[in-house]
Amino acid sequence: MSPLAPSSRPARAVRLLLVDDQSLLREGLRTLLELHEDLRVVGEAGDGLEAETLVETLRPDVVLMDLRMPRRDGVAATRRITARWPDVQVLVLTTYDDDELVFRSIEAGASGYLLKDVGADRLAEAVRAASRGESPLQPSVARKVLGRLRSAAAATPPPDFPAVAEVLTPRELDVLRLLADGTTNHEIAERLSLTEGTVKNYISAILAKTGLRDRTQAALFAVRHGLAVS
């Protein structure tokens, strides 16, 4: 399928490629997402093989990827796209809340995983979060992923919690708890009545003080020490 005609969206809009074998669904997604001036759909694909071709041509910021499609499924396409173009973020959007599909998608390089019953505003924010390098996950999916990570990391425990609790401020601990639930910076900012810039600063401070590598490791640490909100 050919790229869509250029639109008059802002120059800094997030560039999106929609990948789904149902044309009606792609049309609906495009209509909903382009209600937001900072989001621009630059192309559509009906399967993973076509998606890979269009990524090479269009270089979108985010690929919104279905999983079960003809010719090449979403997991295989995600693996190939993220390997060839690591700066392109793949955000899975599917009807399947299946443990194995979740883990295979994340292992293939997907930056996030949402179900198709997600609200329009939540989807738009997840796209923005993915474009910033965050990992938007539906809460039920976040629990699955963090549970798997916790088991995998049991042999390499993070820093001792009592020592960490002493160096973190109460607000930093609040942010850490919300990270454990897979929330985005925007959602953390809303819940704690902060700006997104302040949330980023808190996360940077948490990582610097604890020696944790990234927000995923910080979320894992919080889950293992019973800090998760849900």
Image (tube, rainbow, N blue to C red):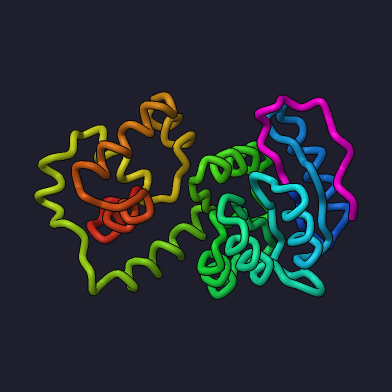
In this rendering, would 141 be left or right of 149?
A: right
Residue 114 visible at all: yes
Tell me if 64 is positioned left or right of 41 in this view. Answer: left
Task: Give the percent coordinates (x, y) of residue 198.
Answer: 36, 27
Q: Nearer the viewer, residue 9 or 191?
A: 9
129 relative to 224, above or below: above
Q: Quadrant of residue 33?
A: top right
Q: Is 6 or 226 nearer to us in this picture?
A: 6
- Who's the residue at 34% across and 73% down the image? 152
Q: Which secondary structure is most common in the magenta stretch?
A: loop
- Which quadrant would residue 31 be assigned to in this image? top right
Q: Residue at x 57, y 67 (%)?
A: 105
Q: Where is residue 178 drawn, in percent x and y? A: 37, 44
Residue plotted at (65% across, 39% down): 124
How many labels sit on residues?
A: 0
**Which x, y percent locates residue 125?**
59, 38
Along the line of sight, which residue is nearer the eye, 97 or 163?
A: 163
Magenta-span inclusion, residue 31: no
Residue 230 appears in the figure? no
Whether residue 8 is in magenta: the answer is yes
Q: Residue at x 10, y 51 (%)?
A: 162
Above or below, 90 relative to 123: below
Decide: is 145 above or below 205.
below
Residue 88 versus residue 205 in the image, above or below: below
Q: In the rendering, at what x and y percent does residue 4 appear?
A: 87, 43
- Magenta-drawn segment: 1-16
Image side of residue 4 versus residue 96, left or right: right
Between residue 180 and residue 40, name the one nearer to us: 40
The quarter in which the N terminus is drawn is bottom right
